[in-house]
Image (cartoon, rainbow, N blue to C red):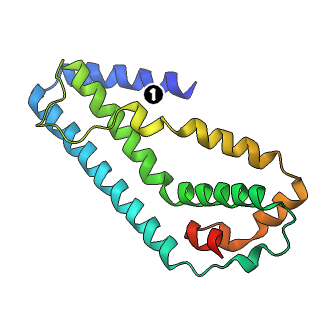
Amino acid sequence: MAARTRYLIFIVSMFILNNGCAVEQAEVIKQSKMNYENALNQYNKQIQYCFDKAQNAKIDRSILNDIKLAEPKLRIAIYWHYKKAQAKCENEKYGLFLIQRGIYSEVLKHYKVKLDNDNPQFYDNYELFGGKYEDIELELKYFSYPKKERDKLNAIQELKNPFKLVRILKD
């Protein structure tokens, strides 16, 4: 329902725009490109922020002493929490980036403009989503572990924020 409402608002706005002053195609493309580049830059800054936060996190393997999982399963569980913490840190900027990427792509399609060297780096779907099936596999493995052990892991505060994966796996 919300998607249909947004579409109707879009149709009304197009009617209003088409009956007002004309906006040049080049201006629309330029603005869309600028919005995309800004979102990409903000996302890259967020990635760096999350990386720095992980590097500075004080965490050691002793927090896992009460977890009763065999080593391979424990490593998978830690990795799942690592991915979850990274996603939590990055997701807002990632979502805005994906929205602006989609808008920019649609603007270029609408005006029949091809991507070329004058356009900012444009990530295709495989670059953005190609490995996501592995995240789903990881999630399924994690949720196959005993709930009691998952609950203990979920209660560990240090795993809720970005952390250096190698540090905890290596200890």
Task: Work out whether residue 163 can be spotted.
Answer: no
Q: Is residue 6 above or below residue 161?
A: above
Q: Which residue is mark 1?
A: 6
Q: At 45% from the left edge and 27% from the top edge, which residue is drawn?
A: 6
90 and 129: which is toward the camera: 129
Q: Quadrant of residue 62?
A: bottom right
Q: At 62% from the left edge and 55% from the top edge, which residue is drawn?
A: 84
Q: At 83% from the left edge and 60% from the top edge, which residue is drawn?
A: 70
159 and 144: which is toward the camera: 144
Q: Quadrant of residue 29?
A: top left
Q: Is residue 91 above or below residue 21?
A: below
Q: Is residue 89 above or below residue 126?
A: below
Q: x%, y% of residue 55? A: 48, 75
Q: x%, y% of residue 88? A: 56, 57
Mark 1 falls on what kind of element? helix
Task: Work out whether residue 16 can be spotted.
Answer: yes
Q: Quadrant of the C terminus?
A: bottom right
Q: Quadrant of the N terminus?
A: top right
Q: In this rendering, would 72 be left or right of 23?
A: right
Q: At 58% from the left edge and 73% from the top edge, which residue is drawn?
A: 167
The residue under label 1 is which amino acid type?
Arg
Circle 1 packing at 10 Å, graded few (<14), some (14-19), many (20+), is few
